[in-house]
Amino acid sequence: MKVVIQRVSEAKVTVDQKILGQIDQGFCLLVAFADEDNDETIEYVARKIANMRIFSDTDDKMNLSIKDVQGSILSISQFTLYADTKHGNRPSFTGAGNFETSSKKYDQFNQALRDYDLKVETGEFGADMQVSLTNDGPVTILMER
């Protein structure tokens, strides 16, 4: 499982010019799954994200979690995180998980985040989406499990 975590002041996702998800302060997550990812992997990553302290406190130190700042999450599926660029000029995506299985894992992951009392907006799994955001900081973290 791979997740790009971006601390944002705002983010939204559209499909066919229709807004599917929109948040103010929080995280924009780009999420991809491999076939070997399981319930334990999903729970571990959700717990780490829910408790990750990358929001600034009054001393401008990254000490606060998304829950502390009452932030929201925009979760976007993005299999291209598994791009293999070692050979040739056209990336291979064979490391990305099976479409149907990954779709279920994506739903499970978003529910796991909601189980931490987080507001989670999503895009549409497998769709051609347009994502816009304002990265705050910028703070961008790559998590792999």
Image: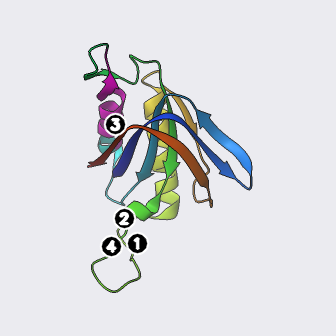
Identify residue for label 1: 93
Please name the predominant secondary structure of the magenta segment in the image: helix
- Element assignment for label 2: helix
- Element assignment for label 3: helix
Sequence-wise first label, 1 or 2:
2
Pick the residue in front: 42 or 64. 64
Residue 11, x across and y down, in percent: 55, 39
Closest to the camera, between mark 3 and mark 2, is 2
Q: Tell me: 14 left or right of 100.
A: right
The quadrant where residue 47 appears: top left
The CA span between labels 1 and 2 is: 6 Å
Tell me, yes or no, whether the two marked residues, 3 and 2, touch with CB atoms within 8 Å.
no
Mark drawn on residue 43: 3
User: Is the residue marked by circle 1 packed among few (<14), some (14-19), or many (20+) residues within 10 Å?
Assistant: some
Please state which amino acid type lies under the numbered disc 3.
Answer: Glu
Q: Residue at x 38, y 42 (%)?
A: 5
Is residue 55 magenta-colored? yes
First to last magenta residue range: 42-57
Identify residue for label 4: 84
- Element assignment for label 1: loop
Mark drawn on residue 82: 2
Q: Residue at x 46, y 35 (%)?
A: 8
The CA span between labels 3 and 2 is: 20 Å
Please state which amino acid type lies under the numbered disc 4.
Answer: Asp
Tell me, yes or no, whether the two marked residues, 4 and 1, touch with CB atoms within 8 Å.
yes
